[in-house]
């Protein structure tokens, strides 16, 4: 697909206004209904392999039925080769935050992002849903509030799940979030996070929350200063 789609290009009745993300699995566009001037707060995700669309729709459906969509984007409509979703307005992919902060973040910010990811995973795991691909492009962070949402559920597993891989992914992300100035206790937690444990993401989230309270005090944060456009 074109890097910058033409304004008159239409897919599934929606005019493509902007390509906001492109990976080896999919392209994501900010869209508006064809024939309407205003841009809606929604995005259109088109999978390169249409079979992944059914898997992702099933994952979102499981989330909505059991725990809502507080830990993810809100699906609006399933399509043969993709999904229409409400735009996560103001959120940025963690990959962009890491790119803007190559030396890492302070412990409070790094820990809060990891905590948000673990809590989102704990919610999904309680619905017997394993994400399966917790990479930086699929972790959406609000620079203003540090709220975390997970997207990219096309590799999800439903039913009998093993949450170990999801937690290990967060450990890997935390290793990139921490800086050379990070406290030893944060580095120790990251190392422990990479080891399987019975309590899974929920237990890890409780441990990290306690560590942040002891290490950093009240959870007050300054917004990230990021350049460039938001992506979904």
Image: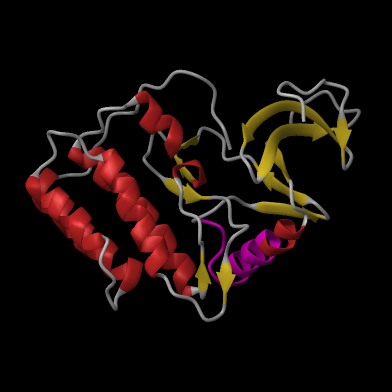
Q: For residue 120: magenta?
A: no
Identified at 74% across, 52% down, the residue is: 49
In the figure, residue 43 lies in which quadrant?
top right
Is 103 located above or below residue 112 in the figure?
Answer: above
**Above or below for 137 versus 211:** above
What residue is rendered at 63% in x and 61% in y?
Answer: 60
Farthest bottom residue in view: 160
Report the residue at 29% width, 78% height from top: 198
Horizontal and vertical percent position of residue 146? 36, 40
Residue 46 visible here? yes
Given residues 6 and 69, the one toward you in this image is 6
The residue depicted at 39 percent of the width and 31 percent of the height is 97
> Is 98 drawn above or below residue 151 in the view shown?
above
Magenta segment main secondary structure: helix
User: In which quadrant of the rendered image does the C terminus lie?
Assistant: top right
Q: Is residue 153 left or right of residue 92?
A: right
Magenta residues (range) = 56-70
Q: Is residue 213 visible?
A: no
Q: Position of residue 59 (x, y in %)?
A: 62, 65
Q: Who is closer to the viewer here, 194 or 204?
A: 194
Q: Is residue 63 magenta?
A: yes
Q: Is residue 50 left or right of residue 160?
A: right
């Amino acid at each position: 697909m074109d890097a910058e789609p033409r304004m008159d290009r239409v897919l599934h009745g929606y005019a493509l206004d902007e390509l906001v993300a492109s990976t080896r699995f999919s392209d994501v566009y900010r869209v508006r209904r064809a024939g309407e001037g205003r841009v809606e707060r929604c995005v259109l995700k088109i999978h390169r392999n249409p079979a992944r669309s059914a898997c992702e729709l099933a994952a979102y459906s499981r989330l909505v039925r059991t725990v809502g969509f507080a830990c993810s984007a809100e699906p609006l409509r399933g399509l043969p080769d993709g999904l229409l979703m409400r735009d996560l307005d103001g959120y940025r992919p963690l990959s962009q935050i890491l790119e803007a902060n190559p030396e890492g973040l302070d412990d409070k910010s790094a820990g809060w992002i990891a905590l948000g990811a673990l809590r989102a995973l704990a919610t999904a795991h309680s619905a017997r849903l394993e994400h399966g691909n917790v990479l930086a492009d699929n972790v959406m962070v609000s620079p203003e509030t540090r709220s975390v949402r997970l997207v990219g559920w096309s590799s999800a597993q439903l039913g009998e799940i093993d949450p170990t891989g999801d937690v290990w992914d967060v450990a890997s992300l935390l290793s990139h979030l921490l800086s050379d100035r990070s406290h030893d206790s944060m580095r120790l937690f990251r190392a422990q996070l990479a080891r399987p444990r019975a309590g899974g993401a929920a237990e890890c989230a409780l441990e990290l929350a306690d560590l942040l309270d002891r290490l950093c005090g009240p959870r007050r944060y300054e917004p990230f200063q990021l350049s460039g456009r938001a992506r979904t």
